[in-house]
Image (spheres, rainbow, N blue to C red):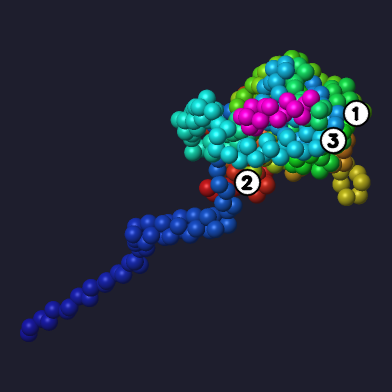
Amino acid sequence: MAVRKRKRKKNIVRFPRGVHLNIGIVVFSFAAFYIAYNLYSYFTAVHVSPYEVEPGTIEVNTSYTGLILRTETVVNASESGSLDYYLKDNTKASKGTLVCSVDENGNVSKRLNETVGSNAVLTEDNMRDIQSSIREYAKGYRDNAYYTTYNFKTDLSGRLMEALNLGALDKISEYTEFARDNQTFHLYRSEQPGIVAYYTDGMEDVTADSVTADMFDHSAHQKVSLKTEGSVQAGQPVYKLISDEKWQIAVMIEPDMKRNLQDGDTIQIRFKEDQTSAWAGYTIEQKNGQDFLFLNFHHSMIRFANERYVDINILLDQQTGLKIPNSAITTKAFELVPDDYFTQSGTGSQKGLLVEHLRDDGSYSDAEFVPAAVYYEDEENKMAYISHENIKRGDLIVKTGSKDRYEISKTARLRGVYNINRGYAVFKQIEEIFSNSSYTIVKAGTEYGIMLYDHIALDGDSVTEDQMITP
């Protein structure tokens, strides 16, 4: 009998599948989270334009309108009649130089004008002089100094008038001698050396002692030309003579400018009209509460003989330091605490204050150490400027080793900028030296200020303390 072999059952044990970590999914997830976080940070963070602090210089030039003071004598006509001039305006005249004439009946003046209209009165010397003036002007002409064209035109017209009138007077000398004998034709000659000008403005007698603030009102200034009428009445002015090369410019200045100038006696100025510079001695006087600066000159007065007012820049020393844009400057409020209340943390690693916080019910908490950064120290009053969200007005601070308490009650504002070197805003106090309309020069190396090549927020009003910054 055959024996049937029994088939053995195989017991198969199924083990649970383990979790297999897919490194690709992990890397992708991390990258996606990183990108999402950065996108969120970018769109929620404040975007601030940075400015790198650099050394810089600003030339301190302050604009003023000055009042010209000089020695002027107005010459009046002794007779009435037709008035003719023989010397061009703003010309130096020696003693005895013929300036003008007055013809009582007008006959000589009429014949003089008829002779001027002819072509025979200009001598060869006159022509050479005029041609030489034209050549000199053409040789020195510059496009960027076009304003000199008007000065040249006025000068040339004056030279031509002078040559024509003197030439005509010489040609009718016999007729003028007859009129002078009859005492109807009168010649006016300069009684002393000086500069002849043909206008009056009623301010010829003003001196440094009589200057007032009202005299700087341009709208009230009345300048009267003496060459427009062609005739004159007895007692009316015919010309004026500026007889001294010494002259002054009076300027009304502010207290700040007075402080800048009070330790000196000479200053450099720039005339705005032609951008030329000059040095002047000066004095400062106060009249009726207003400070006046008097600039003293001894030459070049003829350039402004026809003017009463002149625009100038007072050039002070160049100011050098850290140059920052004005837009970066802002202000921030701080709590003031006595500097002897500061202490160290238990580990000695932080500087701060022991603070008893004011509760809503009017009671105070137990004293706790609060780290507090100092933004500025007022050494004179021994007060420190702090700003901390856990130190508020009404809180008490405790002096270490004493029962003394000080209530936080005083606040003050500082001007400064926000340093953004570390990606968040930190207020830094600045000491301003000088500023113009665009930039400010601040002192370098201050304890609580900024340093060379620091990055600051270009718009200081757009950020706050500890705010995260994205360029």
Residue assigned mark 1? 289
In this picture, is 363 found above or below 137?
below
Q: Secondary structure at mark 3?
A: loop
Magenta-tinted stretch: 165-181
Q: Residues within 10 Å of mark 3 (few under 14, many from 20)?
A: some
Residue 316 spot, x, y in % from top left: 67, 24
Residue 285 spot, x, y in % from top left: 85, 21
Point 72% across, 18% down: residue = 96
What label does residue 79 carry, if any?
none
Q: Identify which amino acid the numbered label 3 is placed on.
A: Ser
Is residue 310 among what the camera can see? no
Residue assigned mark 3? 80
Q: Is residue 328 magenta?
A: no
Residue assigned mark 2? 459
Disc with the residue nearer the chain's start (3 vs 1): 3
Q: Identify which amino acid the numbered label 2 is placed on.
A: Asp
* Nearer to the camera, 390 or 264: 264
Q: Identify which amino acid the numbered label 1 is placed on.
A: Gly
